[in-house]
């Protein structure tokens, strides 16, 4: 039949009943282009769609995945929780300290165009001894066991999935390894790689992870799940025989395949990460952007301070908690404190700071007015302190009538 003859076929000449079910194959449908789909499309039940988040948008198990909140400060040469909330860098064997910071995502780049403005950044020191077997450097994010246990992931089933996605940039072109870790029962490890990164170029990495019958995740407030990005690991922690993208029992010496040492032996090399998302399902959906206030509220379960935004915890700050009070016996005071804005994960460790009055650099001093002037006094965390309130006591001054202080409370995993 010629093209002209096909064009002469009248509308409605071919009815649905004239086409056999087997005549329209999956191959023909998959080759269908958008130009053939004009006008209104028929309604499709949402029950027929797969790989969509249950709420209609991504439910990110990661808190502060866009690296917006940094209550403790924006730069530090110490390891652990020092800058961006809920994420740390760890390691050992360095000749010169690693600098961690909250960095800006440059405008005009992707992920900037996707709404990301901040990243977690580490900058290498000068590792003059080279890449030693016992050296390691990583970035870690820890998740409460109950958050994974109640996420909807059937972690015991190999046909139930979670998807990890993140944006990463390295000043050195190379491949990096990482792993997921479950910490309850017999610890299980799932190694992955970023693939070869182009220097100074943001790359999105996506990993889909199945469940495994050997996984145990308790329904409690302790650390149950961990993500590690291994910027470098010496051979004490690696093995060339480690398989990627599969679960295996964790052992310290077989965390990932052997690391490339180029980044680690490059002075001032940088590594940045943002847009970290862990969600239920086999597909990486669009990042769940939350407002700063939403992320701060979630972060405060693990760390909160009485300082205002942009003020790192330090003594001698004018803006503070300011109350009156008197000793209950002689010069001894008790029951002073404050309510936490958010209930914390566990009873936190607390550091007190003096205000600008009676300022002291001594840890856990507070400022008190004794009737004739301000001075600093050593405060002790009282046993009545809880996940909801911080209380302190101490041997201050018989004439104490006012007190000022700030605090940092931490209940990290």
Image: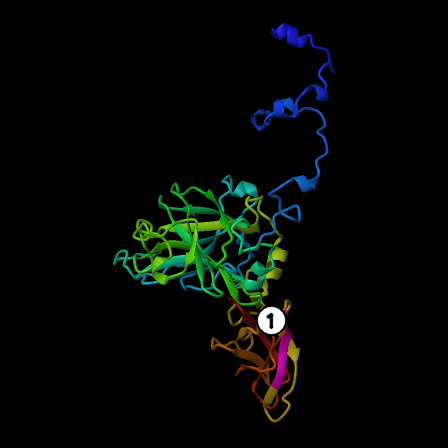
- The span picked out in magenta is 334-340
Q: In which quadrant of the rendered image does the N terminus lie?
A: top right
Q: Is residue 73 visible?
A: no
Q: Which residue is mark 1?
A: 320
Q: Quadrant of residue 63?
A: bottom right
Q: Is residue 315 magenta?
A: no
Disc 1, SS:
loop
Examine the rendered structure and indicate whether residue 60 appears above or below residue 320: above
Which residue is outermost to the left? 129
The residue positioned 61% from the left and 55% from the top of the image is 152
Badge 1: how crowded within 10 Å, few (<14), some, or many (20+)? some
Colouring chosen for the image of the structure? rainbow
Q: Is residue 189 visible?
A: yes
* Residue 372 drawn at (x, y percent): 60, 85
Q: Quadrant of residue 52?
A: top right
Which residue is outermost to the right? 12
Number of marks in the image? Answer: 1
Residue nearer the viewer, 325 or 413: 413
* Residue 241 drawn at (x, y percent): 32, 52
Residue nearer the viewer, 106 or 232: 232
Examine the rendered structure and indicate whether residue 191 appears above or below residue 111: below
Residue nearer the viewer, 310 or 153: 153
* Residue 287 drawn at (x, y percent): 57, 46
Our reading of the magenta stretch's main secondary structure is: strand
* Residue 377 drawn at (x, y percent): 53, 83
Residue nearer the viewer, 246 or 367: 246
The residue positioned 51% from the left and 39% from the top of the image is 108
């Amino acid at each position: 039949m010629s093209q002209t003859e096909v064009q002469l076929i009248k509308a409605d000449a071919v009815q649905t009943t004239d086409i056999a079910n087997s005549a329209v194959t999956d191959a023909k449908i998959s080759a269908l282009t958008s130009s053939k789909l004009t006008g209104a499309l028929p309604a499709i039940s949402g029950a027929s769609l797969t790989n969509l988040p249950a709420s209609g948008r991504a439910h990110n198990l990661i808190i502060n995945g866009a690296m917006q909140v940094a209550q403790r400060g924006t730069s530090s040469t110490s390891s652990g929780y020092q800058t961006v909330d809920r994420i740390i860098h760890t390691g050992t064997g360095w000749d010169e300290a690693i600098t961690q910071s909250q960095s800006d995502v440059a405008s005009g780049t992707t992920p900037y165009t996707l709404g990301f403005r901040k990243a977690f950044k580490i900058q290498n020191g000068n590792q003059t001894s080279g890449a030693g077997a016992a050296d390691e450097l990583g970035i870690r994010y820890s998740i409460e066991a109950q958050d994974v246990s109640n996420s909807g992931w059937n972690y015991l089933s190999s046909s139930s999935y979670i998807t990890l996605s993140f944006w990463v940039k390295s000043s050195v072109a190379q491949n990096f390894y990482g792993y997921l870790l479950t910490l309850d029962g017999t610890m299980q490890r799932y190694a992955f790689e970023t693939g070869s990164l182009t220097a100074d170029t943001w790359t999105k990495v996506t990993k889909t992870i199945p469940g495994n019958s050997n996984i145990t995740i308790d329904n409690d407030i302790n650390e149950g799940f961990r993500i590690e990005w291994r910027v470098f690991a010496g051979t004490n922690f690696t093995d060339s025989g480690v398989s990627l993208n599969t679960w295996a029992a964790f052992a310290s010496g077989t965390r990932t395949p052997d690391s490339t040492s180029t980044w680690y032996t490059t002075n001032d090399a940088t590594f940045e990460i943002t847009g970290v998302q862990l969600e239920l399902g086999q597909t990486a959906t669009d990042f769940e952007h939350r407002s700063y206030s939403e992320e701060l509220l979630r972060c405060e379960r693990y760390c909160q301070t009485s300082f205002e935004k942009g003020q790192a915890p330090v003594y001698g700050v004018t803006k503070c908690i300011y109350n009156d009070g008197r000793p209950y016996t002689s010069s001894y005071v008790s029951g002073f404190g404050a309510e936490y804005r958010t209930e914390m994960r566990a009873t936190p460790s607390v550091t007190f700071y003096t205000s600008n009055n009676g300022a002291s650099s001594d840890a856990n001093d507070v400022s008190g007015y004794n009737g004739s002037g301000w001075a600093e006094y050593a405060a002790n965390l009282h046993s009545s302190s809880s996940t909801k309130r911080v209380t302190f006591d101490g041997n201050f001054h018989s004439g104490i009538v006012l007190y000022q202080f700030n605090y940092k409370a931490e209940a990290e995993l």
